Amino acid sequence: MTVAVNTPKVSVIIVTFNAAAVLQRCLNSFYKQTYPFLEIIVIDGKSNDGTVDILNSNADKIAFWKSEPDDGIYYAMNKALEYVTGEWVYFIGADDEVFPEFSDLLYQLKDKAAVYYGRVLINGKPTPGPVDAYKHAKDTICHQAIVYPAAVFKKYKYNTKYPITADHLLNMQCWADKGLYFEFIDLTIANFNHTGISSVKIDKIFKKDQAALILKYHGPQIWGRYVFRKFKMMLNPSKYKNSNYTD
């Protein structure tokens, strides 16, 4: 494949803590990509399980890495953003991996006003797309499905008040930003490990604030629909145990 001279650099951010069992697989999935301009940045939370040994052994392929104590996932992501030199930014967990289609999506990055997203596999099934405003407000888009213009992070950072789902708020801010729009590309770009913290724990602080955040960033119509759904859930919780019920 001929690479255009203006093909942009994409910064890949991986945050780790005691990820020795999975990190090399994640890194290898990027080494296999055909897209030529990837910058891998790893911020580690002072692991003690061999993660740092893996980082040392991959130092020639990693643009930047650091291992020191931090206060959680989004503190580490914000820290990583300080070292980004690419025009686009992609976040992935150390227990996830990208597919060849990741490169196919990157070759389609054209508009720096667009937040591009594809699909990921969760428990072997692809996520839906495209996502409308209500789905975006209620459930957001899987972090590993999204490639952001780096300029987003000149305006916004992850709000560390929310320890598990700060990316949901960031996506709300991007959705409400008149200078940005979301663009779906129908490619399955990554495998998302559904046993990670965001899948097995609820961000109670975010859930408490979610209605107010929806009103602020999505407006009264979407907010009203969300609040009405919450009311219906209270009246008939058994109905909402069915994960296919997305009202």
Image (spheres, helix red, strand yellow):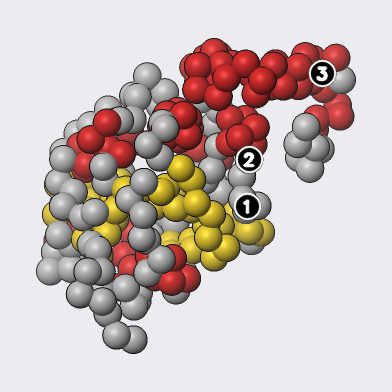
Nearer-N-terminus badge (3/2): 2
C-alpha distance separating marks 1 and 3: 25 Å
Residue at the far front: name it. 178
Q: Amino acid at mark 3?
A: Lys
Nearer-N-terminus badge (1/3): 1
Which numbered marker is on residue 232? Answer: 3
Q: Which residue is mark 1?
A: 129
Q: Position of residue 80 (x, y in %)?
A: 21, 43
Which numbered marker is on residue 93? Answer: none
Image height of 182 relative to 174, above or below: below
Q: Which residue is mark 2?
A: 132
Residue 57 lies left or right of residue 4; in this view the side is left
**Corner quadrant of residue 162:** top left
Image height of 96 relative to 136, above or below: below
C-alpha distance separating marks 1 and 2: 8 Å
Q: Residue at x 36, y 54 (%)?
A: 111
Can the viewer see residue 164 in this picture? Answer: no
Q: Position of residue 150 (x, y in %)?
A: 27, 46
Return the residue nearer the eye: 204 or 24.
Answer: 204
Return the residue nearer the eye: 105 or 180.
Answer: 180
Q: Amino acid at mark 1?
A: Gly
Image height of 185 relative to 219, above or below: below
Can the viewer see residue 156 in this picture? Answer: yes
Q: Position of residue 141 (x, y in %)?
A: 54, 43
Label tally: 3
Mark 1 vs mark 3: give the one in front.
1
**Corner quadrant of residue 98:** bottom left
Mark 3 vs mark 2: give the one in front.
2
